[in-house]
Image: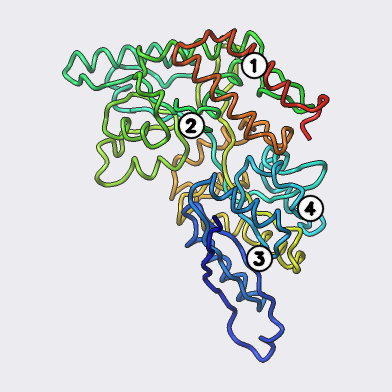
Amino acid sequence: MKLKLGTFILAAALTPFCAQAVTLKIACGGGIDDLCKQSAAEWAKKTGNVVEVVPTPSDSSALLALYQQILGSGSDKIDVFEIDVVWPGTLANHLVDLRPYSKGAEAQHFPSLIANNTVAGKLVAMPWFTDAGLLYYRKDLLDKYKLKPPTTWDDLAASAKKIQDAERGAGNEKMWGYVWQGRAYEGLSCNALEWVASYNGGTLVDASGKVTIDNPAATKALEMAAGWVGTITPQAVLNYGEEEARGVFQSGNAVYMRNWPYAWSLLQKSDSPVRDKVGVIPLPQGGANGRHAGTLGGWELAVSRYSKNQKLAADLVTYLTSAEVQKMRAIQGSYNPTIPTLYKDNDVVKANPFMAALYTTFTTAVSRPSTVTSTKYNQVSSQFWNASHDVLSGDQKAGDALSDLQSSLGALQSGGSWK
């Protein structure tokens, strides 16, 4: 079934030369349409061109399917695409190398994002806004029990159990220590990658394309998480996505929560039971020798190789991803910048006090192996989240699940190559 696309037209003020104006089409979705329209209109006014903003599906799977349909046909229907951080490898063959047009602007962004968006030496997308997994915690409860925010997973488990049991004893039988995303979907891949990476267990597939998931550190990480289920984490977490976890935490029934930055503004709404009671820090490290590891998320802007106006489209992308526009989006919409210096900007920090604490998290964010596994990433991730879910649910032991996963991922490769 083909999806119909509506358009919103943003045009520069009419001039005697308006017949010379070029019309560009950009796909903006994911709840950021208003800010995209605003900035695109500014670019149109500056350059004397026209921008048509094409609304897209909010569901990422439907969005990717639509993009593949359009790009696979070689259509010039859209010049600029908003793409998920895990799609550069999947869509790279249809996208323009932006380095000849960027004038070095990529140097301003987080290196991990530029590396993520570079496929076979070509910069196929520019970072637009970013995400990373974070730990939310109840400041009031930690203060009540004279506990410090956890730095390791063992610290988290111990304090979560202590507060959970005490609060239940005081009458809140619904209290849990820790909620996260445990449903068998991409969100679980993000959580599980964080656990594995925090114990220095790698990222499933390394930068050279070698499958590395079957190792003692990864096994320990999954065994740890499985031990939470039914103790500090409800059994129902096996069906939780982001919003289910947030619902429990925001209702006041969890001490800790793993989620993305978007949750902050919702937790601070005037009708939120936990308003002004929440802190946010990097996710714990896997023991004294481990590391803090938040999975990299976010969205990028890319130019279609089928665009008839590639240079102009690249100029639009450069403008939309500039420090000027990113600062506006951070202040008006709490979208996390991809430019490190903005995390020290007084206006940005004033509007979003938590962002200053995110700087280290983003500079050390862990990328999913989407670029190296290219078009097979969805299969890789699906196998990873299913294996992880089997361990969490008790259907399989961690060592056996990862051994099987190592073999099945190896079988996905064609002669040792992911292409």
Badge 1 element: loop
Q: Say if mark 2 contacts mark 1, CB within 8 Å.
A: no
Label 2 to label 3: alpha-carbon separation: 37 Å
Amino acid at circle 3: Lys
CA neighbours of label 2 inside 10 A, class few (<14), some (14 to 19), many (20+): many
Residue 184 lies, in percent from the top left, at 48, 27
Count all numbered tags in the image, as a single digit: 4
Lower position in the chain sequence, tag 4 or tag 1: 4
Distance in Å between CA atoms under marks 4 and 1: 33 Å
Q: Amino acid at mark 1?
A: Gly
Q: Secondary structure at mark 3?
A: loop
Residue 134 is marked as: 2
Side (left or right) of 65 relative to 97: left
For disc 1, the marked residue is 201
Which residue lies at the image location 82% right of the left edge and 41% below the top edge? 120
Q: Quadrant of the C terminus?
A: top right
The residue that disc 4 covers is 97
